[in-house]
Amino acid sequence: MVQQGTILHNTGFAEPARTRMLDRLWEIQNRQRFISDTDIRRLAGEFSISAIEVEGVVSFYHFFHRKHAGKFTIYVNDSMTSRISGYDRIIRAFERETGARHGTTDATETFGLYATPCIGLCDQEPAALINFHPFTRLNALRIREIIAALKKGAPVETLCDEPAAPIRYTAGERPGIFFTAFTPGDAVSKLKTNSPDTIIGALKTTKLAGRGGAFYPTWMKWQAAADQPTGNKVVICNADEGEPGTFKDRILLQKVPETVIEGMTACARAIGANFGLIYLRAEYQWLQKPLLELLERYRNKKLLGRDCCGLKDFHFDIRLQIGAGSYVCGEETALIESAEGKRGEPRTKWFFPVQRGYLQLPTVVNNVETFSAAARILQHGVENYQSYGIERSSGTKLISVSGDCRKPGIYEINWGTTLRQLLSLCEAEHPWYIQESGPSGTVLSLDDLDVPIAMFDSMLTQHIRCGGALTIFSKNRDIIEILLNYADFYKKESCGICTPCRAGNFIVERKLERIRDGLATNEDLDELRQWGRLMRMTSRCGLGKTATNSIETALKKFAYYFESHTDPADKRLNMKFDLEGATADYEAYKS
Amino acid sequence: MNKHVTLSIDGRTILADEGKNLVDVAAENDIFIPSLCYFKNMDQPLGTCRTCTCKVNGRYGPACTEKVREGMVIEVGTEELKDMRKALVEMMFAEGNHICPACEKSGDCDLQHMGYELGISVSRFPHLFTDHKIDWQARRMLLEHNRCIKCMRCVEEVRTDNGKRVFSYQNRGNDTLVGIDYEQEALLSTEQAREAMRICPTGAIIVRGESLGKPFGQRKFDMKSTRTDFIPQRAYAKSSETKEKKRIATTSLAGCFGCHMSMLDIDTELLELVELVEFDKSPINDIKKFSGRCDLGIIEGGCCNDENIETLRAFREHCDILVSVGECAIWGGLPAMRNQLPLGECLEEAYLNCSTNDAETALVPYHKELPKLLNRVYACREVVKIDYNIPGCPPDAQHIWKAVKNLLWGEKFSILYNEFKYD
Ligand SMILES: Cc1cc2nc3c(=O)[nH]c(=O)nc-3n(C[C@H](O)[C@H](O)[C@H](O)COP(=O)(O)O)c2cc1C
Ligand code: SF4
Ligand code: SF4
Ligand code: SF4
């Protein structure tokens, strides 16, 4: 029997009403431009929870506002790639044209102007979202035109850009894996001839590993879920892509979303799931409509729904869940919490998602690229996949390249390509500081040029295990500014429930400020290293564990930079103290 | 009957029920694993505070989210792990604003107790001094955000009879705090409200009228450790060796002289002190200038103005060993309550907008002879290198005297449990 307050899908899968919390909040935010106390009380009544719990959800996500956010809400990307392409100028131009100060609305509440971390358009910065429609390659003139048109009443959707999907390179001479032709059914049609065991076996042979950054063997995850007792099971596609500098999942969803849907369907078949969920980050809302339409087409073609893909008793359908602005919701258990309509707080490791995930059911969470690759393996076979890449790292990898280079965009490289080759492909002229896998990854310098990008290296030497982003900075950029930008990001994006991450990121930022202000000694650098290690060893989820990766590796790779930014401590006092700075506030009262 | 498993903790072989929580298993075997958020066997432990971090089969992780399994190898007592856990508790002190002498929970507080057990005299991290509020709007309780460590106990445990939460996290990142639902709070019975205060490991939840201070000696963690593996400290006999006379300088910066008063509490041992020590610059003899090199400098109070900075620097220059005595010197203490606000706001409230001021003539004092106020109160260790810290508000007289004797003449000592306090 279906309980009251549940939503039943045509596959027989039921979800409690609470799972629609984010959808309900979006409705209110979109209509009214903020969420009022009355709304909160009403929702509390609707879901039979206390108002403070609803408020806790609202205040967790930065796209929900408790004050009016303007009829047109503008979000400008404030990540590093935007900072180096004129962020300050863009903010000033928006302020001038709209009359709204950064972080507020104008007096008439027509425009609200806010900053947000990476919106996944690093290949066409400076970029912004207005009512979640994308605007790319902005400049002051363009902003003047846009705002004037909006004031005249032009609809946003007629002004916005269709973001380009620059695929710059696909595995050299050969067609590559991810962007070859694909018509709906190309992968799922193989389900009729492949048993669940064969599907998992194919993944095992190709050694496909999670492309969300952790490289966990995909077949092991699917097998573990398949081994759970039969019953309701769930497949989730992680399309939260929040790691600054990463936009490969966006390109896949723009260009070949069919492969993602079919990869999920294959997973459902393999593990015996009857429900699927795509968790799409709010920044990609402009992809919502095409995705919903595509899902509908799949249903019409009977590739989703009851007895789908021509398989009797195989019921599977997919729901699209839009996030609401939170990086940590990319962490799989936080994502599950968020999809259940709660705060996006990562769970403990007491249970794994394959045991108890979404709604406490066995759940597989995989990245967009992982599902896409799985579909391609089904479509073209194991041998084709294995003919790319190197030993122990077969296949190709999508890398989002941005920053100081001439050709930002997506590069589908063979595993084993060296950093030097990639930098030359994207025409990076003066690379100096290179961030791989975004802020949570590591820092590379010119010493690493000949290191191959690989999951596992056959020769067991060094390799770069790149999760999907390569952000290039030239000598004109200041390392401490980059690290401070990342620290600020983590300080705000930490979910805040465990001590080392919540307090640690804040403390680390203070320390970096000391370096910036010329107050740091070598002792401060040592402490940074120790505290980074502490956070890595004791944090609850990957966010806190990796937040200091770039600091720790930068200290190693750019030791000379930090040496030139610190002094040996004063022997007499053993400490530096800026007395003039500390009394400056008081000097204001000198009459 | 439950299946038994064999595991090893720090090399000891232990027999336990399979699937039982590691923290409990360790406690049953008299192995102390510090913990703050964990408090009873829950199916889904909270795992928020991370102070039970240990090594399980070679990997770092919190003990509270481990179910014991056959053959598990656990490390608890390595120096590295001890230091990590200590660092995490220090982080909580640096993150909140903990003024123990003014706290209703002092002596009954799990966080403070953990500080004692781990021997924290100073936090290695800079105090953040974020501006936290005190929420007084609920009917029966106060929520003191300065003291909350976001352990999640109240969020998970405190519910009304119809199952609704009374507390829930708000915001995220460094702005995370625990919010209270006034409507639901009003539905709690007195007993349920008391229970909320009881399960809170800090003084963040205070029930009105229930928090009358208990006198020292009657509180939970006053006199002796609650650890089952506690090794009592030894009292050492007085050494009879003749001691060389030493020079000491002392000062009170932004402090209340309470620490100096406490030093006088060593009673008859003052006679010994006078024999053994010569005072250089100190308020005790009112000598204003250093007359030479000193063996030891004792600093009470933090730095709130430029004169404090000069004095502190002079102490560093003239003293071989420098000791911060008391909470104010160690991290700012009571005067640092102003650190949560900009200096301008404090001055204008005190000198311009205060109701007892005459609006016409009010002004913020500024004169070249007056010391210049700093933008915030600084801990001594932010200005010069401090060699040792003696906590307390004020520290116990015996604690100070024992430490001084050790530093000057190498006399063996141990600080008794009841001498190491933050209030
Ligand atoms: C803070 C944090 C953010 C993450 N963000 C993403 C993300 O945006 N997309 C993603 O696919 N995985 C992300 N992950 C990794 C997921 O937790 C999870 O490992 C992944 O979705 C599993 O899929 P895969 O095995 O296909 O990589 C993130 C992890 C952490 C700790
Ligand atoms: S590491 Fe950070 S994001 Fe992860 S659970 Fe802890 S506070 Fe939350
Ligand atoms: S007694 Fe506990 S809660 Fe109160 S100030 Fe001290 S440490 Fe904080
Ligand atoms: S109020 Fe107390 S119980 Fe609740 S989270 Fe804070 S410290 Fe924990």
Image (cartoon, coloured by chain):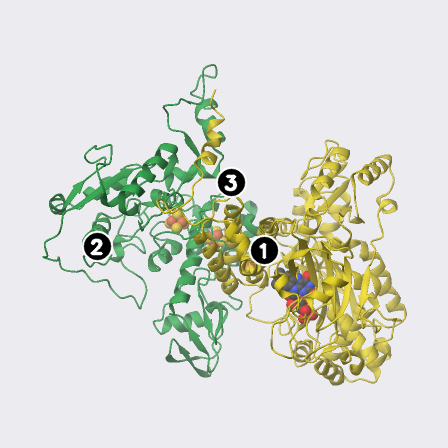
Q: Is mark 1 on a helix, strand or loop?
A: loop
Q: Is residue A131 visible?
A: yes
Tell which of A521 and B124 is nearer to you: A521
Mark 3 or mark 2, earlier in chain: 3
Image: B112 above or below B300: below
Q: Residue A495 carries which label?
A: 1
Q: Which amino acid does label 2 sit on?
A: Asn
Q: Who's yellow, chain-wise?
A: A
Q: Mark 3 points at which residue?
A: B137
Disc 3 from disc 2: Cα separation: 50 Å
Asked if marks 1 and 3 fall on the same chain, the answer is no
Q: Is mark 3 on a helix, strand or loop?
A: loop
Q: Mark 3 lies on which chain?
A: B
Disc 1 from disc 3: Cα separation: 26 Å
Q: Who's green, chain-wise?
A: B
Residue A269 screen position, x and y as percent? 77, 78
Residue B260 screen position, x and y as percent? 24, 40
**Residue at the image point whose x is 31% and y is 43% from the top:** B316
Asked if marks 3 and 2 fall on the same chain, the answer is yes
Instruction: Determine whether, in the image, residue A232 is placed left or right of residue A568.
Output: right
Q: In which quarter of the image is residue A115?
A: top right
Image: A207 above or below A496: below
Q: Is mark 2 on a helix, strand or loop?
A: helix
Residue B110 screen position, x and y as percent? 39, 56
